Image: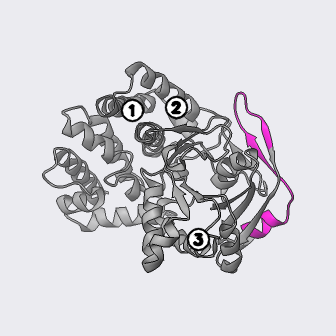
Amino acid sequence: MKAVHFGAGNIGRGFVGLLLHEGGYEVVFSDVADALVDAINAVDEYTVHEAGPGGVDHVVTGFRAVNSRTDPDALTREIATADVVTTAVGPTVLRFVAPAIVAGLARRSPDASPLQVMACENAIGATDLLRTEIESAAGADAGALMSRAVFANTAVDRIVPAQPAGGGVDVTVEPYFEWAIESVPFGGELPRIPGAHFVDDLAPFIERKLFTVNTGHAATAYFGAHAGIERISDALADPEIAARVSAALEETSAVLVAEHGLDPDDLAAYRATILERFRNPELVDTVQRVGRQPMRKISRNERFIGPAAMAAERGLLSDALVAAVAAALEFDDAEDEQSLELQRLLRSEDARDLTELVTGLDPEHPLFPSVQEAVAARQEAVREA
């Protein structure tokens, strides 16, 4: 069995690639970073270190890497004969992945089993997005080529912090992980992925993860950055920050109960587990890494505005989530393009226009006034600085 994984970075090697290896797949990493591809191909094994209580080391073998930029034909051949294709590249990069999958499907034997495609991204419906991009790239051939693949959405969760210098292609991760996958698209022919669980309805898993793990992680980063704290674990050691993050997650849990009928006690236990993971002092994770790309993280269907809008529509509280958005507006990192752009827009745009532009909220939405107020307050602080 063979799996092609787009994105040979830390998540690709330390999470998706590891589990595919443990399922018996030969793993072919695809990336555009010359040095990373060369480094992977220069070794016969790498180690995934689990940092924290109960953590163990996993040795990964049976892999190689292809450079999709310099050798696209090699990637096409690998996809044409693969059983599984996965991604961990970021939702905005999926449109660049799609043409390569189209090329592989075009060369794939019509008699081969359908290629099992899963986008493992921090976004709702990421595989649906990838499928749309593939159909678009396939053009007139879409009908024939799409019959050679099946597409399943996933929800993935594992903290993979910035890696220590000199570690080569080894990866440090947390012990905890979750990989939930839609079962229905596979028609009973499930991919072999140890530790993954297959579910009929993925929506509750995706939103539970996005609105708890991603919301909590980013809120910790933005509140921590506001307080001048460098590490995520140190930020949550601050009682005031911990209380503000907990308040935001209580609001998202209320939304999850209302939307999906999830059990409040189960969600309380899940929140506690998530916060304990963030407190892991052996994961050297920074507020700068977690907080990067603030414009994406305060967009309409993301971790703050998404649940806050759902809460406002149902008459539920969203104050703590709006406070996290306000903290995100303050995030000013000279090495992050979105942070720089956000600060530029705060200095140049009207509060109402900027709120609509960045959050995607309609001005008539019940959440809009409170978010606009946060934007205006940040603009006032910027002017006075």
Q: Quick check: 198 above or below 246?
A: below
Q: Which residue is mark 3?
A: 105
Residue at disc 2, secondary structure: helix
Q: Which mark is residue 274?
A: 2
Q: Quick check: 249 above or below 291?
A: above
- The Cα atoms of the two marked residues, 3 and 1, are separated by 42 Å
Q: Horizontal and vertical percent for residue 21? A: 75, 49
Residues at discs 2 and 1 in contact (Cβ within 8 Å)? yes
Q: Nearer the viewer, mark 2 or mark 3?
A: 3
Residue at disc 3, secondary structure: helix
- The Cα atoms of the two marked residues, 2 and 3, are separated by 39 Å
Q: Is residue 102 visible to the viewer in this orientation of the structure?
A: yes
Q: Residue furthest front?
A: 111
Residues at discs 2 and 3 in contact (Cβ within 8 Å)? no
Q: Nearer the viewer, residue 146 or 161?
A: 146
Q: Nearer the viewer, residue 191 or 262?
A: 191
Q: Quick check: 104 above or below 324?
A: below
Of labels 2 and 1, earlier in sequence is 1
For image coordinates 16% across by 44% down, the residue present is 366
Of labels 3 and 1, earlier in sequence is 3
How many residues crowd mark 3 within 10 Å: few (<14), some (14–19), many (20+)?
A: many
Q: Which residue is mark 1?
A: 249
For image coordinates 68% across by 36% down, the residue present is 282
Which stretch appears magenta? 36-58
Q: Amino acid at mark 2?
A: Ile
